[in-house]
Image (cartoon, coloured by chain):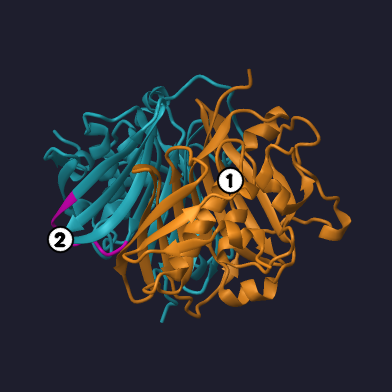
Chain colours: A cyan, B orange
Amino acid sequence: MTHVFDEAIRVEARGDGVFYATTHQAYDNMVGPFGGITAATVVNALQQHPDVLGTPLALTINYAAPVANGTWDLHTQIVRTNRTNQHWTFTISQEGQTVSTGSAVFGIHRATWSDTEAVRPDVPPAENVAALDFPDFIAWASNYDKRFVVGGLDGGKSDDSTSTLWLRDLPERPLDYPALTSMTDAFFPRVFLRHGTYMPAGTITLTTYFHATPDELAAQGSDHVLGTARAARFGNGHFDQSGQLWGGDVLLASTHQLVYFKDPT
Amino acid sequence: MTHVFDEAIRVEARGDGVFYATTHQAYDNMVGPFGGITAATVVNALQQHPDVLGTPLALTINYAAPVANGTWDLHTQIVRTNRTNQHWTFTISQEGQTVSTGSAVFGIHRATWSDTEAVRPDVPPAENVAALDFPDFIAWASNYDKRFVVGGLDGGKSDDSTSTLWLRDLPERPLDYPALTSMTDAFFPRVFLRHGTYMPAGTITLTTYFHATPDELAAQGSDHVLGTARAARFGNGHFDQSGQLWGGDVLLASTHQLVYFKDPT
């Protein structure tokens, strides 16, 4: 049986770097699809391109307009292939209108000096943290087991926009680059947490750096990922938030986004 | 007399969103121009476009290949103009080859609830910190007054990749969006600091979120900006670093990049 995530990120390659995709109601957000599933679908498509080099290193996706439920076209272009990395640009369109743009870098992992300076939050194990449900109007969230250590939005408004949570596909699914991509957008807009309520907000642009190697993803399997995210500055209708996704002691990805918001009325 | 920065970011608009630019030897880096000046030139061009909406909110620039010294062409495209923001894509080419791609979001500042969660480093005033010179082969750096509180690379290798410094154009120049853009790339690759030496490294992709309003930039004038940056994870030939630029107590910009490196030989 196909996992609902694999149904949602499925693409049909039409040659010349063009892929067809279809939104999936299981990953609906308040308006249109969850941005994470759109980004994951792009990564899934790029990975299937016959000329792809290596695995994802960086992704930027710009949400220029809401994606309508239904089919969409992904036009991808290899800008340049270097010895160890490859630059891509892409465009998502619906009925001839561009709704998203973006760029990606894929590449080869080379053995080098290594160190992680980011510090994994000190948290209890996933099995000791209660799972939290989101309201039904956030359909995509029901495809994740979400166990908030802090910042679950069930505690009202907070002076600190940090959420730290255990996160896993529901049902369980081995982690891969598309699944990791989707999880980078699983942190709800930090302004909700500051105000203790849902309010009009949407990601404008999302950038993720993928640190995980294929071996690290294989080692992660379908265990819970530890996510943490916090905003830097809110004001003038926008804010930025940054997050990390950890698998055990391995920093799998760093992720950043700029978000539009309106004051609650 | 024109400031050398304004000479370096000068563009000639050729209509249809195409601009011509020329590298400036004052902003040379070890190989080709300093990435910050290339990004600043793009912002300068977009600001001059007759159809631009508002001021910069986000910029992603992908350095796909080294820029050769000489002229380059910038092709810009307005993807979509919404009520309060505008999405752009752009390509930089030299002799028909694409060397950089990117995207930008411009927009309007709306009065909303505001707060800054990021914490400005607690540092002595700029006048109490000694200026540091970089080696002559990093030409661009001589156009900045750089006063390192920590992480100046003059102390050898460090277990912590943090640099915190006072930064100002030299000669002084009132801060604007292009100048702020350039400063987001003024943090040298964090791997230098961990190894206490220069080594092969280069930015692959840079993303900046601009928080500063025009009024905040005007208030900043030509005072020193406080910059701080740190890496998250190094390994497998790449690392990511994140930085902040502060003007007084105002977070002017958040900036992130993925960097390629080779081990020192």
B19 lies left or right of A37: right
Residue pointed to by mark 2: A96
The amino acid type found where label 2 is placed reads: Gly
Q: Which residues are magenta?
A: A64-73
> Around disc 1, counting alpha carbons within 10 Å, would you say few (fewer than 14), some (14 to 19), or many (20 or more)?
many
Q: Residue at horizontal 64%, vertical 43%?
A: B230
Pointer 2 indicates a residue of which chain? A
Count the labels in the image: 2
Is residue B32 visible in this depiction of the protein? yes
Q: Position of residue B28 (x, y in %)?
A: 61, 44
- Between circles 2 and 1, the one closer to the viewer is 1
Position of B202 relative to B180 (above/below):
above
C-alpha distance separating marks 2 and 1? 38 Å
The amino acid type found where label 1 is placed reads: Phe
Residue pointed to by mark 1: B34
Q: Nearer the viewer, residue A18 or A176?
A: A18
Tag shown at residue A107: none
Q: Position of residue A125 (x, y in %)?
A: 50, 36
Q: Is residue B18 magenta?
A: no
Q: Residue at horizontal 48%, vertical 66%?
A: B56
Position of A110 relative to B167 (above/below):
above
Q: Position of residue A93 (x, y in %)?
A: 20, 56
Q: What kind of secondary structure does the magenta stretch mostly adopt?
A: loop
Q: Nearer the viewer, residue B70 or A81?
A: B70
Q: Quadrant of the N terminus of chain B?
A: bottom right
Q: Is residue A66 magenta?
A: yes
Q: Residue furthest right?
A: B128
A37 lies left or right of A262: left
* Element assignment for label 1: loop
Q: Nearer the viewer, residue B134 or A145?
A: B134
Pointer 1 indicates a residue of which chain? B
